[in-house]
Amino acid sequence: MQRITLLVLVLFSQSIFSASKITDTEKLAATCKVWGFLKYYHPKVAGGEVNWDNQLLEKLPLIEKVQTKEDFSLILENWIDNLGPIKEIGPIAAPKEVKYFDKNFDLSWINSNKLFSKKLSKKLKFIEENRFQGEQFYVYTGEGVGNILLQNESFEHPDFSDKSSKLRMVFMYWNLIEYFFPNKYLMDQKWDITLEKIIPLAIQSQNYDDFYLSMRKLVSRINDSHTEFYLYPSPSAVRKEKLFFPAKGKIIEEKLVVTEILADSLAQADDIEIGTIITKINDKTIKEIIAENRELICASNESSYLDKVVEKNLSGYSDTVKIEFFKDNKYSTKTMTWFNYHDSHRNEFKKGARKKKEKFRLLEDNIGYVDMGIIKIRNIPDMVEALKNTKAIVFDMRNYPNGTFEEISKFLNPHEKKFAIYTIPDLSYPGRFRWTSGSDAGFENKDNYKGKVIMLLNEKTQSQAEWTAMCFQTSGNATIIGSQTAGADGNVSIFDFKGFNTQISGIGVFYPDQTETQRIGIVPDIEVKPTIKGIQEGKDEVLDRALLFIETGK
């Protein structure tokens, strides 16, 4: 009996000890959260009174050595205590006029983290309740709009041989998104899990390329089509000129179909025309290319992702590229030489490459057409005069507009009407967002346009284009035809680091009834997608469907 009791006691003590032990990733993820929280909440840190990066670099080696949650919590408690006393000003009353959007806001980890002692959780909660209320040292909001911008950050490369130095940059970016990305709640993968997965990759990286690959994977997880990751060449790298395939394309049925010729002479040399099908690039199928880029390209939805895959793989730095084509029911492979025909010194490659596009024109059956990608504000009076008596106007937004929404909406709308509302970061309570009054379109106008308003949209319709579509929808007689848009609206916040440049959608954009647009995009009333057959026959199937709708109402 005594032996059994002794065995039970031994097993019980081992289980207690085992439960108390923590992994390196758990410690570092929790440290990242506490460091970021104090960065934006603690009066002395958020006010810029301490060198917060240096303090992290000093503490990480100590944290690395601890093996129990008790010792881990003690380091963090002492760290907070050493920052000095915090004046008790809570509870901080929210302004009566402020309406909060709290789908991003979650500080429950302060009390629920299994690594934290009750004493540590209590200290963190006290800091939240008595948080910094001045001008944030590390972030500020853009004038008039409210998107987040950085200041007083260290953008230097980390020391790639030093674990702590690499983690500092990971922690900095992760907390920036944690507290100030308006669409964090819409990510496919919880941001906490992304942190846990990226920490080991960053630690294992040994050089410039490896580390920034891990950063690219971190950035790509926010699921925002506004987000790109532009890696600057390493100081030791041999700088190369970027080269391009002589055409644009679109992925349909896991094939890459040429949709527009960009350099006639180059395309003709390799027998490339609109409708040409590419099945492989450098021996990889389009399906394989789609799969291998999942961790490296950031997009709000699949439509935008595929569009970005095309752009990424129709350019590069290799002098020659092996391409497999499918034409006349047979496959052929060519080793192509790509050029930088975008360079202003290569005008000979561009001659006749694109037909001159008209800003607006009159189609058959008294239907107007406007190319929103090229029409400018100064052209609107002429457009109105030419198209005001048409039975319908097709606004082609499969492009990026030039700020013409206001003048056109005055022409389309009989009344002033709100078309969008926004969420912006509240720097007095980081992680929380507040609603703004939004934007209105049109004015009281009895002479407004009386015909049908048709908008053509697809994955190229992003940001201002999506916002403009929302604006035109208020006209009261609008129909959207096409396919899913990019799902990235709102002003962009740009972050330019020494090693890379990236950006995010800086504010949340919603319809006035709070319906989301991020990731979803602007939903078409009639869905139409181009087909390979249609492209090869030279058809614009989306425009054709719009003309059918104008004629039949169906």
Image (spheres, rainbow, N blue to C red):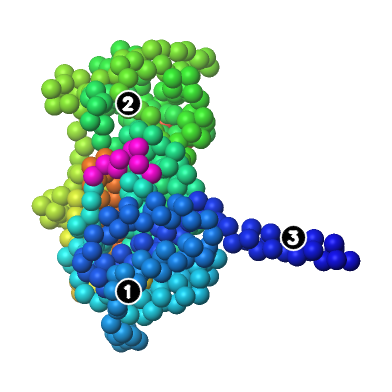
Could you give the CA–CA distance between mark 2 and mark 1, rounded to whole angstroms?
A: 44 Å
Magenta span of residues: 156-163
Rendered image: mark on residue 316: 2
- Horizontal side of 63 relative to 264 (left or right) equals right
Where the N terminus falls, by quadrant? bottom right
Residue 38 in view here: yes
Q: Nearer the viewer, residue 341 or 318?
A: 318
The first of marks 1 and 3 along the sequence is 3
- Our reading of the magenta stretch's main secondary structure is loop
For mark 2, does the 10 Å Cα neighbourhood hold few (<14), some (14 to 19), or many (20 or more) residues? some
Percent of width and height locating residue 542: 40, 43
Q: Nearer the viewer, residue 257 or 229?
A: 229
Q: Nearer the viewer, mark 1 or mark 3?
A: 3
Q: Which residue is mark 3?
A: 11
- Horizontal side of 202 relative to 151 (left or right) equals right
The first of marks 2 and 1 along the sequence is 2
159 inside magenta stretch = yes
Task: Describe the element under mark 2 as helix, strand or loop.
Answer: strand
Residue 430 in view here: no
Rendered image: mark on residue 31: none
For mark 3, does the 10 Å Cα neighbourhood hold few (<14), some (14 to 19), or many (20 or more) residues? few
Q: Are marks 3 and 2 in contact (CB under 8 Å)?
A: no
For image coordinates 32% across by 42% down, the residue present is 229
Q: Nearer the viewer, residue 379 or 484?
A: 484
Residue 397, compared with residue 84, is above or below; it is above
For image coordinates 23% across by 30% down, the residue present is 235
Q: Which residue is mark 1?
A: 429
Residue farthest to the front, as pictured: 2
For mark 1, does the 10 Å Cα neighbourhood hold few (<14), some (14 to 19), or many (20 or more) residues? some
